[in-house]
Amino acid sequence: MHQFQCDYIAGCHPAVLKALCETNLEEVPGYGEDVFCKEASDMIRAACGGIDADVHFLSGGTQTNLTLIAAALRPHQGVVSASSGHIEAHETGAIESTGHKVMTVPEVDGKVTAEALRRLCADYFENEEKVLLVQPGLLYISFPTETGTIYSLAELEELAAVCREYGLFFYIDGARLAYGLAASPDVTLKDIARLADAFYLGGTKCGTLACEALVIKNPTLKRDFPALMRQRGALLAKGRLGGVQFAALMKDGLYFEIGKQAVEGAMRLRKAFIEAGCEMEGGSPTNQQFVRITKKQAEMLSKKYRYELCGKTDDGRFIVRFCTAWSTRPEVLEELIADVGTLRRA
């Protein structure tokens, strides 16, 4: 059975595994105070344009989100998210468990719009009885979104401007950042670093065994952050694991090459579905492809491939997701593309 249901089905990129093995017996201090974390942090800062930022390595995306967001917000504040945002729909109430409300706005292609954010902020800050309400304190978006769409540079600039206008922190979830950057025609890592107060480079879905690299630029958010990580159980005793893995990914631009290869494969798969007469769900240019297929087509593909069922249409078709990743083998992708070609006859 070939696995296409998500982008974390394999262990880690061979270069990451090689680095872990080569450094395994080296003895270094714990809690991120080691040469590997320093090297990886320097490489990340350089890739971001030489920014003044703190870099921390956490074990997973949900942990990164709840630790950063809880640290950023005061007790009376909430976080703004698209209605389909990961913190709203896929994290088991992790943010709410920290005592903060997720304040959702309607999505447009999976995205938060500057107009919706401004309206929400104005509704609060211009309300004479705002003392009775939760105050928006941080904007959360992901790049790419849950539906595989990406923000344009202009859209990110507009969101950052609204955040500055109303005093919100701007935080970008980069669980699939390598794939989003590869698919974007105008957004670079330097743009992300310039506009966001904090963001993270995803590792779990982009080549590490585990670990995300959280980049904090805003001085207010930097303060005592390791202590807040410790309080949330996010400070790894063997912090070296994050450093070793991300140093391997950042070397010679491997992180970006991983994204490029996966997106190129996804675009070929998308083309195959379209040529087979299938209707795509949305316009994802990233490694996540959503497609509508009939029950018979689903049965045909299910014989050899595992994919994610996302929903069902009114006419009885299934909305399914196929993901490519750094680990997608070329020969398996070719096999899938060939099998997709047979769906036209189904």
Image (cartoon, rainbow, N blue to C red):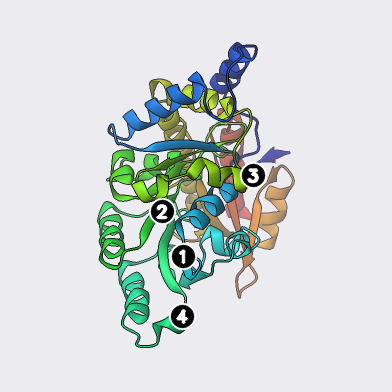
Indicate which disc, 4 or 2, sits on the residue closer to the N terminus. Answer: 4
Indicate which disc, 1 or 4, sits on the residue closer to the N terminus. Answer: 1
Name the kind of residue labelled 2 in the image.
Tyr
Which mark's residue is nearer the viewer, 3 or 1?
3
* Viewer-nearest residue: 237 or 61: 237
How far separated are the C-alphas under marks 3 and 1?
24 Å
Q: Residue at x 43, y 22 (%)?
A: 39
Q: Is residue 166 left or right of residue 207?
A: left
According to the picture, the residue beneath numbered tag 3 turns out to be: 233
How far separated are the C-alphas under marks 4 and 2?
22 Å
* Residue neighbourhood size for the residue with mark 3, other residues' Cα within 10 Å, grouped as few (<14), some (14–19), many (≥20): few
According to the picture, the residue beneath numbered tag 2 turns out to be: 171
According to the picture, the residue beneath numbered tag 4 turns out to be: 133
Q: Kindly check if marks 1 and 4 are in contact, taking CB atoms under 8 A apart as contact.
A: no
Residue 205 visible in the displayed image: yes
Name the kind of residue labelled 1 in the image.
Ser
Residue 218 visible in the displayed image: no
Which mark's residue is nearer the viewer, 4 or 2?
4
Q: Position of residue 20 (x, y in %)?
A: 60, 19
How far separated are the C-alphas under marks 1 and 2?
10 Å
Q: Which mark is residue 81?
A: 1
Which mark's residue is nearer the viewer, 2 or 3?
3
Indicate which disc, 3 or 4, sits on the residue closer to the N terminus. Answer: 4
* Quarter where residue 97 is shown: bottom right
Name the kind of residue labelled 4 in the image.
Leu
Q: Position of residue 66 (x, y in %)?
A: 56, 54
**Count of residue discs:** 4
Q: Residue at x 29, y 36 (%)?
A: 51
